[in-house]
Image (cartoon, rainbow, N blue to C red):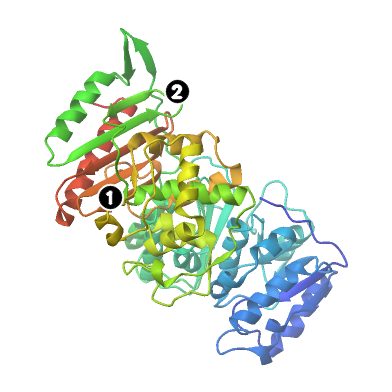
Amino acid sequence: MIDPKPLFPGARVALVAPASAVPEEKLPGALDLVRRLGMEPVLYPSCYFANRDGYLAATDTQRAEDINRAFADKTIDGVWCIRGGYGGHRILPLLDADAIRKNPKWFGGYSDVTALHLFLNQVCGLATFHCTMPSTEPHPDTYTLDYLKKALFGGLNGALSNPEGQSIRTLVPGKAEGVLCGGNLSLLAASLGTPWEVDTKGKILFLEDIGEKTYRLDSMLTQLRNAGKFRDCAGIILGAWTDCVPEISLHDALPILRPLRHHPGAAHGAQVPSERGRGQHHIGGVTMNDLASRLNAVMDAFPAKTALYCVDLTTGTPIAAIRENTRVVSASTIKVSILCCALQDVMDGKLSLDQPLAIAPADFCSDTEVFEPGYRQDGASLWEMLYWMIVSSDNTATNTVISLLGYDHVNQYCRAIGLTQTSLQRKMLDFQAIAEGRNNYTSPADLYRVFSLLYHGEILNKPLREVAFDFLSRCRSTDALQRYIPDAVTVLHKPGGLDHLNHDVGIFLTDDRPYYLGIFTWDGPALDGQPQQNRLIGQLSRMIYDAMKGEK
C-alpha cells in the first residue's frame, strides 16, 4: 500500500464532485474551508452546478476525467471530494489506474466516495482518507476539525478517541490488527459481484450509513455475511448510523446484529500435531492407510469414476492419493493454468492488466452471466476478463483470453512449469471441437503443481500472485469442496463441470496445516446428477478436513 505524501500549507488541492451536484450556495463555504486550512482550492468542472447531468454532478465521463486529470497534474498535491451523494461507482470503469499509480496523492472523502476508496485501495494500492468533505461540513466542530487536520497534514499517529461523552462500546471482545477498509454499508453491499468488490481478508472492516430503514440494514449486513466478508475480516468497527432510527425495540433488533455478533474471524483452532511412527504418516491420530480406506469406501459406492489428491503444503507430504495422475477432461479447472499463463505474460511485460480486450463474436457464449450480445465489445480490461473467468467462470471472458494468448502459448507455458497431463485444445463450450475429438485435459496431480508453485512463490511475482489468490478466493461456486467446511476456513479454489463430470480443486488455508485438495468425478450421472457429485466432493472434502484437524 502506497502512503501518499501529507499535504502542507500552500498545497494545491483539487476539488472534485464524483457523485451528486454541489448546490451553488454551498460552493463558497467549501472554498473558504480549504483556504482556512491554509491550502489553495482548485475547482474542477464537476463542482459547478451548471454542469450537472440530472441527479449527477456532471456526466460520467466528465466526473471521471476530473479525477484522472487531478492525479495526472503535477501541480496538484491532493484530491478532495467536495461532497458525496450518488454516482461514484458509475465512473469506476473510466478511471485511469496506471496514471493514479504513477502519481499517488492524498485523497479524501466519505459516504458515496466509498466506491472510489475501494478502487484506489484495491486496484491502485493507494492509502486514502475517509474524512469530512468541504461542501458537506464547511464548518466542522472542534473534534472533527482536529482530526481533519491530522489526516491532511500527517498527524494521524497513536491512539484514536471518540468525541467527549461518546464512549466506545465493544460488542465482541478480542484483539485484532489489520489494514482499515470499508465505509458506507450501502456502497459496500453494492460492490459485491463487481471487479471492485470489497476485499476484507485480514482487514479491519469499517461500516457506517445514513437514512436507512432497519430492514435495509439487516438486508445489507446479511448480504455481506453471505458473501463471506465477516468471515474473512480480522475485526469490525461500527461508525455512525445517522438517521437510521430503529423501527422496533432494541431487544427485538438484536437478531439483526447476528451477522456481526457471530463474526468468527477472531476464532483460532487448536494446533494439530503430526508425527511419524511405526512407518506410517499420522494425521491427527488417523493413518494415511486408514484415511485412504475410508475415502475409497465412499468413492466406490458412488456411480461415477473418481480421482483425489491431497498434499500437505507445508511439508509436501501426500495425505491421500487415489488415481491422482488420471488424465481427465478438465472442464473449467483448466482456467487456473490459463490465469497463470496470462499473469506470467503481464509480469514479463508482454501484456498489461489494464489493456482493453474486444469480444469477438466467435468468442461469445450464450451462458454468460456478465456479457450480453454486443455488450462492451469496445473493450473490457484484461484484469476484468481474468476476474470474471475465475470468479464467475464466465466462458465468454475465458474465450477472449484464450484468443489473446493462443493455444500453443498456453500449452508451452504448462509444459514449462512441469505440467505433463494438461493441454488446451478447444475454447469453452465448443461442442464442434469436442465432436472432432479435441478437448481440454488435466489431472489432480497437475493442478496440485500449479497451486503449489503459486503457494510457495515459485511462479509470478508477489503482486501478481496476490491477484491470482484474490480471484481464486472469490470463486462464487461453493457447493462442492467448501460444501461442509466451516465458513472461517479460507479456500482458494476453482470448480468445473460438464454434463457427466464435476471437479473442484484448491488450497485450504487452515490455521495449522494448509493443504491442497483436488477431487475429480466423471462418467457419472448427467446434468441432473451434478448435485449428487457436488455432495460427494463435499463429503470427501470434509473427511480430509476432519483428518487434518484430528477429528474422527
Residue 514 location, x and y as percent?
42, 32
Crowding near the residue tagged with mark 2, few <14, some 14–19, many ≥20 C-alpha atoms within 10 Å? few
What is the quadrant of the C terminus in the image?
top left
Vertical arrangement, residue 277 with respect to residue 550, above or below: above
What's the residue type where badge 2 is placed?
Thr
Residue 89 location, x and y as percent?
54, 72
- First of labels 1, 2 by sequence position: 2
Whether residue 50 is visible here, answered yes or no, is: yes
Viewer-proximal residue among 50 and 373: 373
* Mark 1 vs mark 2: in front: 2
The residue singled out by tag 1 in the image is 479
Q: Secondary structure at mark 1?
A: loop
Residue 227 location, x and y as percent?
39, 56
What's the mark number on residue 315?
A: 2
Crowding near the residue tagged with mark 1, few <14, some 14–19, many ≥20 C-alpha atoms within 10 Å? some
At x 15%, y 29%, the residue is 297
Viewer-proximal residue among 509 and 324: 324
Q: Secondary structure at mark 2?
A: loop
